[in-house]
Amino acid sequence: MDGSGLTQQPKKQKLNEERDVVDRNIKCLHNLPEEILRYILSLLPTKDAIRTSVLCKRWEYLWTSIPNLYFDGSELAKRKNFMNFVERVLLLRDSSDIKTFTLYCDVLRDASHVSAWISAAVRRNVQQLYIRLCNFREPFSLPHSLFTCMTLTELELEMPCILKLPPTICFTNLKTLNFRYVTFSNEYLTQKLFSGLPVLEQLDLDYCKWVNIKVVSISAPKLLYIGITEDTENQNDEKGCRVMISGVSLNVFYYFGEFYNEYRVYNSSSLVDASIFVDWSLQRQRQVAHRMYVLLTGFYRVKKLLLTNSTLEALTNAEVVELLPHLPIFKNLEYLGFDESLVNLDSIALLKILQKSPRLKRMVFSEGISLSSDYERNDRILDPVPPCFLSQLNCIKVYDYEGDEEELSAVKILLKNAVVLDKMVITCSHHFAKDLENLNKVHEQLLKLPRGSKHCELVFDLNLS
Amino acid sequence: MKFCTVKQYFDDENNNNVTNGIATTVIPLPNKHLKIKANNKEMEQYEQELLRNVMPQELTKLILAANYLNFKEALDFFCRTVANAIQNKSVDYVRKFFGLESDFEPGEEEKLCKEFAWSFEGVDED
């Protein structure tokens, strides 16, 4: 053994001992005051927070005041554990308020349990409730207390089954409401529901069904936004439901569907932004066209309108074409946009809408434009030329450009007639932007087109971002 | 910032070495925080650095200092750092992190794990 080694060891040991003493005096994280520990737990996902129960005796019930509970039981394999877990957590949780309660689960034959869990959240003054239920093997109803919950500000309910409504409905503080896949079946109570939303600002109805309901009136005085996405499955009722929407405060309207139901927006003086995306099949064109027309007539004050090519095609149905000249003047319309698919400029509906939009400043074709290259006929597409083309229209944007004849013809007719145009922006499709050979040729073609507006700038965007 | 409470804190604290350590980390924090408040990515990097350089015991001191100084943003930041550090980690890891030892009777811990079995799915191995 080395002499120096012998003398060094005891010295080292002494240093370590000293450090241990100091270490014990320095506070460990677990000595933090309880409120801070609880705060840390409230920042954790539910699973992690509750696992701390196992750390030691002091921590066994520390988690019981966490304000946000998130339960996702989508994985059916672990169902028994999940059900036990939720039961236990709700049993042990203290009486402090719950802020956010999220529950995603298959109901199967546990309807009473699920209902009780939601009840427990309501009892603890929940503010934001997110529920997604599916797979009902027995009748299910939400607890009545949910419908009179005074603390609820946000409710998201996804429940592909009939919504059983209680006699008393009063959502005093509800600001955001989203129903998905819900079936409304009682006309009287459904009407009560949609009349008892005094401070609601945002309403989303996605894939909901109206069964045995002829008319319903949605009159929420503070409603700013309404979005309706219709169920694409064929509904039993031929006529569907007439949904009357009072737009006293309404700013934004969004619709996507096939008009299985009829929608009307009245008192819409504050409506600024409307989007109507429609899908339709040949046998239903007449109904779709009528309902489309009715809806459009309520939007005469909007500043921004988003449509699709299908919308235009639907409106060219024989009966409705007669009505087009009777469309109101869209006196505030400044922005007209098209989404979803290519727009065929040879559309009488488009011409009529443009003729009724004296203050239109911008047009955007997000999926491109086309016009058959029949030179003789094309000159008559914009005949008579809409007034906005002569005095207001200053910007047109065309996307998804690939340089075909049809696209070129369409751009040609627009450039020719928009005599106060400042800018025409043509953006290439990602696919075409790689065709370096033809890009220049196409750019040249576009630059050569005659422009009705002397100061018009043509921007050719390669869409490289 | 709150200079009087800062001075008071220094006067109260007995161990000068520890105080100096805190001073170099906590005091520059308001400025740094204000600068990088908007930028989430930078905060994340700063958080990683903090975790690497600062032992859990030091983190305790930082949290207590922020709490005493009533510095909400710093307290929130440090607490989130702790929460992120223990997320999805095993029970043993978390015990070590907090400096805890189990004081359950044999079988008690097992019982709790069974009751909350669903929350133990997919936890990181040590």
Image: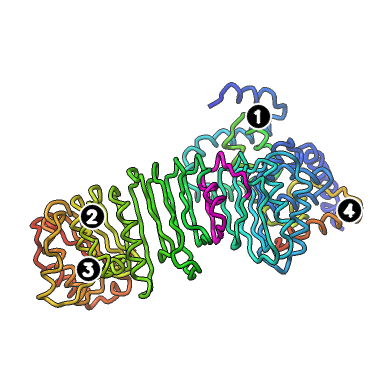
Circles 1 and 2, Cβ within 8 Å, touching? The answer is: no
Quadrant (top left, top right, bottom left, bottom right) of the C terminus of chain A: bottom left
Type of residue at label 3? Ser
- For residue A362, the mark is 2
Distance between mark 4 and mark 1 Cα atoms: 37 Å
Q: Nearer the viewer, residue A11 or A450?
A: A450
- For residue A368, the mark is none
Circles 2 and 3, Cβ within 8 Å, touching? The answer is: no
Same chain shared by disc 3 and disc 4: no
Circles 4 and 2, Cβ within 8 Å, touching? The answer is: no
Where is mark 4, residue-wise?
A: B108
Circles 1 and 3, Cβ within 8 Å, touching? The answer is: no
Residue A91 highlighted magenta (yes or no): no
Q: Nearer the viewer, residue A152 or B50?
A: A152
The answer to which quarter of the image holds residue A445 is: bottom left
Which stretch did the figure color magenta?
A166-194
Q: Position of residue A72 (x, y in %)?
A: 66, 59
